[in-house]
């Protein structure tokens, strides 16, 4: 389905990122895997796939994103699909007690990272006249929650950015959509919530399949959607 497609996956060494990388690899794509350190890339991708490239970068820094994407373009000569998988969760304080550090951490990682990568990637998609962008918001973005104000706000911002980008780019043959995962079945989440019913959580592979659909020609008519993918939770 994605033979010779050129895909960028941010946060590619994370649990969801790995599933997304594998999904596109297994369907013939070349993947640029971007994460924050060589150590984590080497540990997770000990056997690097021929044709892929593995890059480090600071997604919260626009210049760093530009440098990484310049490397991708030099290797791939174009980008067809951008998957903004990188992000983070942090329980915070009450809203009136939220520190600048908490706010900045979550908005930089969850929101600014998408803006920075879009600034680096969208111009080449515009030049090519085609492209697919899939962002990761969260089911929690649909409403506020106690001690999660900064997190839910940052993910709600991802939804609004997705909708705005979709309106800006759909006439240019570029689709922009986002996923709203529930609790993802990862080792870290199992350790943090050992008493939860893990069978009700959504697997990274299930989310990757939905991302693959949104990045495919089958989703050509979908713009600005927020797709809930939350298993049985």
Image: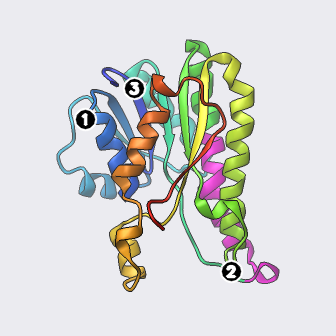
Q: CA distance from mark 3 to mark 1?
A: 13 Å
Q: Which residues are magenta?
A: 94-117
Q: CA distance from mark 2 to mark 3?
A: 39 Å
Q: Tell me the residue at 28%/30% (across/down).
A: 27
The image position of residue 90, as x and y in percent, is: 58, 73
Quarter the N terminus occupies: top left
Q: Residue furthest front?
A: 232
Tag 3: Cα neighbours inside 10 Å, few (<14), some, or many (≥20)?
A: many
Would you say 83 lies left or right of 1 here?
Answer: right
The residue that mark 1 highlights is: 26
Rendering quarter of residue 200: bottom left
The image position of residue 128, as x and y in percent, is: 55, 13
Residue 6, which numbered label? 3
Q: Is residue 191 above or below residue 222?
A: below
The residue that mark 2 highlights is: 147
Q: CA distance from mark 2 to mark 1?
A: 40 Å
Would you say 98 lies left or right of 186 here?
Answer: right
- Select label 3 or label 1 by which is in front: 1
- Select label 2 or label 3 by which is in front: 2
Q: Residue furthest left?
A: 47
The image position of residue 208, as x and y in percent, is: 39, 46
Rendering quarter of residue 127: top right
Residue 79, which numbered label? none
The secondary structure making up most of the magenta span is helix
User: Is label 3 in contact with label 1 (beta carbons under 8 Å)?
Assistant: no
Q: Is residue 208 above or below residue 70?
A: below
User: Is label 2 in contact with label 3 (beta carbons under 8 Å)?
Assistant: no
Dot 3 falls on a residue whose secondary structure is: strand
Dot 1 falls on a residue whose secondary structure is: loop
The image position of residue 114, as x and y in percent, is: 61, 45
């Amino acid at each position: 389905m994605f033979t010779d497609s050129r895909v960028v996956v941010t946060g590619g060494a994370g649990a969801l990122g790995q599933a997304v990388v594998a999904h596109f690899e297994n369907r013939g794509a070349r993947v640029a895997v971007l994460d924050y350190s060589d150590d984590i890339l080497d540990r997770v991708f000990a056997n690097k796939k021929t044709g892929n490239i593995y890059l480090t970068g600071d997604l919260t820094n626009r210049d760093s994103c530009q440098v990484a994407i310049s490397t991708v373009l030099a290797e791939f000569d174009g980008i067809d699909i951008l998957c903004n998988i990188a992000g983070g969760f942090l329980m915070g304080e009450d809203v009136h007690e939220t520190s600048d550090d908490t706010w900045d951490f979550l908005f930089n990682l969850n929101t600014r990272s998408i803006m920075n990568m879009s600034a680096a990637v969208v111009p080449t998609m515009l030049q090519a006249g085609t492209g697919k962008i899939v962002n990761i918001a969260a089911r929690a973005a649909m409403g506020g929650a106690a001690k999660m104000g900064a997190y839910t706000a940052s993910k709600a911002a991802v939804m609004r950015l997705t909708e705005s980008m979709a309106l800006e780019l759909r006439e240019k043959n570029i689709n922009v959509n986002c996923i709203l995962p529930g609790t993802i079945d990862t080792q870290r989440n199992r350790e943090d919530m050992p008493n939860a019913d893990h069978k009700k959580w959504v697997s990274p592979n299930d989310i990757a399949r939905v991302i693959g659909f949104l990045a495919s020609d089958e989703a050509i008519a979908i713009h600005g959607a927020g797709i809930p993918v939350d298993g049985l939770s």
